[in-house]
Amino acid sequence: MEPNRIKSLWADGKPVLNGWLSIANAFTAEILAEQGYDSLTIDLQHGVIDYQAAVGMLQAMRSSDVTPLVRVPWLDPAAIMKALDAGAYGVICPMINTRAQAAELVSYVRYPPGGTRSLGPTRANFSAGSNYAGEADDNMLCFAMIETAEAFRNLDEIVATPGLDGVYIGPADLTLGLTGKRYPVGFDREEPEMVEAIQTILAKAHQAGIRAALHCGSPGYAAKAIGWGFDLVTLPNDVRLLATAAGASVAEARRLMRT
């Protein structure tokens, strides 16, 4: 089986730059896969992507060195197992609030006896290489999203879940959960209490021997998060990149027209 490049980077002490795909288009996925990301995540929770589109996107990404991940819609065994069968090298699962839920997530990612994943890697048998069933457990990544006040309260128990590879912070939802609507919604938190909460999650994950990932809204914040010690940071998604570039292009054209 082709090894998980994310794990290879971590073994070399290097952080991972993750891209984010929310547009249901194989060509978009192919373009971003050639831009130098270490990994790309297909977002089945909030992205406008169904399963069939996700399969095409995974196929489009295969020619690059990028490692494919999927954020599944929820803690659902069918969605998690089908994402892995389609060729994802790991899943990010939203709204994990307890150790029991984290253990349930792990079980869906691992084959017996370590888990309950059903054997049937229809596409992964071809995309990931030979001996998939024998080596998948060592290569799949399992991330639990920490994004609620309940998850933050249960953090010590969640990070101690056997088989969990890491926690993935959703800072927008986490801010809503911890502070209500006291602050504007967004990713790159600068409020002292939120920075402290993010760094607490990072520290507790590392103390438990697992990885920590952070969803970021800008390259600058991603670089700062790596400086704090995060193992994986997510850069702005395809929607934001397209909107930002298009807006800047139109604004520049109108500026030049006025002159």
Image: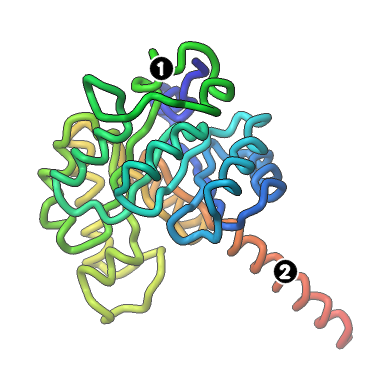
* Distance CA(mark 2)–CA(mark 1): 44 Å
Q: Is residue 193 left or right of residue 242?
A: left
Q: At 49% from the left edge and 15% from the top edge, which residue is drawn?
A: 1
**Callout 1, which amino acid?**
Ala
Closer-to-camera residue (57/214): 57
* Mark 2: few/some/many CA within 10 Å (<14, 14-19, 20+): few
Residue drawn at x 43%, y 57% is 45
Q: On the picture, is 201 further left or further right than 74?
A: left
Who comes first in sequence, dot 2 or dot 1?
1
Q: Where's residue 251, x and y in %?
A: 75, 78
Q: Where is residue 54 in the image (x, y as percent from the top left)?
A: 56, 46
Q: Mark 2 points at which residue?
A: 246
Q: Which of 178 and 113 is in front in this view?
A: 113
Left or right: residue 86 versus residue 57 is left
Mark sitting on residue 133: 1
Q: Is mark 2 on a helix, strand or loop?
A: helix
